[in-house]
Amino acid sequence: MLCPWRTANLGLLLILTVFLVTDFLASSSSCMDGTQITQNNSAFPTEVNISWPILMGKNAVLCCPITLKYLIITWEIILKDQPSCKKAYKKETNETKETNCTDERITWVSRPDQNLDLQIRPVAITHDGYYRCIMGAPGGNFYHGYHLEVLVTPEVTLFQSRNGTVVCKAVAGKPAAQISWIPEGDCVTEQKCWDNGTVTVKSACHWEGHNVSTVTCRVSHLTGNRSLDIELLPVAGAKKSAKLYIPYIILAIILIIVGFIFLLKISGCRKYKWNKTEATPVVEEDEMQPYASYTEKNNPLYDTTNKVKVSQALQSEAGTSLHAL
């Protein structure tokens, strides 16, 4: 069984520990290098520059590590293709002044008389540049600068083209990504730079003559590394897919032949009718005479009539002869 007074002491000890840790964290500097300038720290260098890569879309806090009084603090911001922006604060009169500062995402963290740090919320690709805190004092100036490098994660794609070549792309990354293959193949790598500072890297590889079924594209970048795998389509499979179209091709050829024959048939019928119309002869009397002669020869009526005519002619000739005698 737990004693009540021991439980209370344990709870009090836990609260005291949390309070001390919180107080320590609150009193520590939020600057990247953790240094501050005081009037007794005469050994501090007059200029410090820090390279700071930061991912696009994150929030950034740029610290001006100083606790001096009666100073003029000026943040100088130099961005690409933009005029220099200056944000100044004079502690003696508690006055602030801005020159050529139009980006509303770059502001003081809070009131300058409470906090001299600068913040960017959120970081965009246009914030790539140099930020310098200038601390003016009667004994001289101190400079604390940041070379801010905005990182952009590339979009990675991997696919196999129709000719069997495998293409790996790292699109619109900053800085340019590095592409490698497992296993190594016959590769061609090219880069395309965009106006906003991003770079697209394209690597095309093929493994002809190698017994390779699966390949891996590895993309190395400051924002993180990625690996994509793909199974290669074998040549037999490519031929098999091509054979799927053969029945459709044969059907198309048959339809074309049938259609051609049908057109020839229609055209032949029309030509036959046209020739028949043109070849119809005009019936003449002379052309009918052979038919009439044939009819007369083969008709019994015409035979009887002819016999009568012949006998009458013979009688007439005989009468004429007797009359002459």
Image: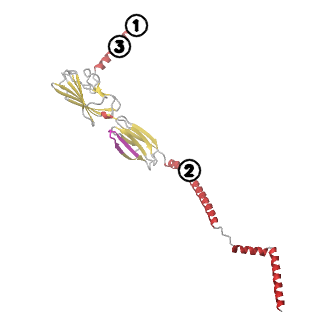
Secondary element type, mark 3? helix
Q: Position of residue 46 (x, y in %)?
A: 19, 29
Near-viewer residue (89 or 182) = 89
**Magenta residues (range):** 190-204
Q: What residue sits right under mark 3 in the picture?
A: 15
Q: Quadrant of residue 302?
A: bottom right
In this picture, is 246 found above or below 57? below
Q: Classify mark 1: helix, strand or loop.
A: helix
Q: Nearer the viewer, residue 319 or 207?
A: 319
Amino acid on which the number 3 mark rests in the picture: Ile
Q: Position of residue 256 (x, y in %)?
A: 57, 55
Q: Earlier in the sequence, mark 3 or mark 1?
A: 1
Q: Nearer the viewer, mark 3 or mark 1?
A: 3
Residue type for callout 2:
Tyr
Q: Earlier in the sequence, mark 1 or mark 2?
A: 1
Q: Is residue 135 visible?
A: yes
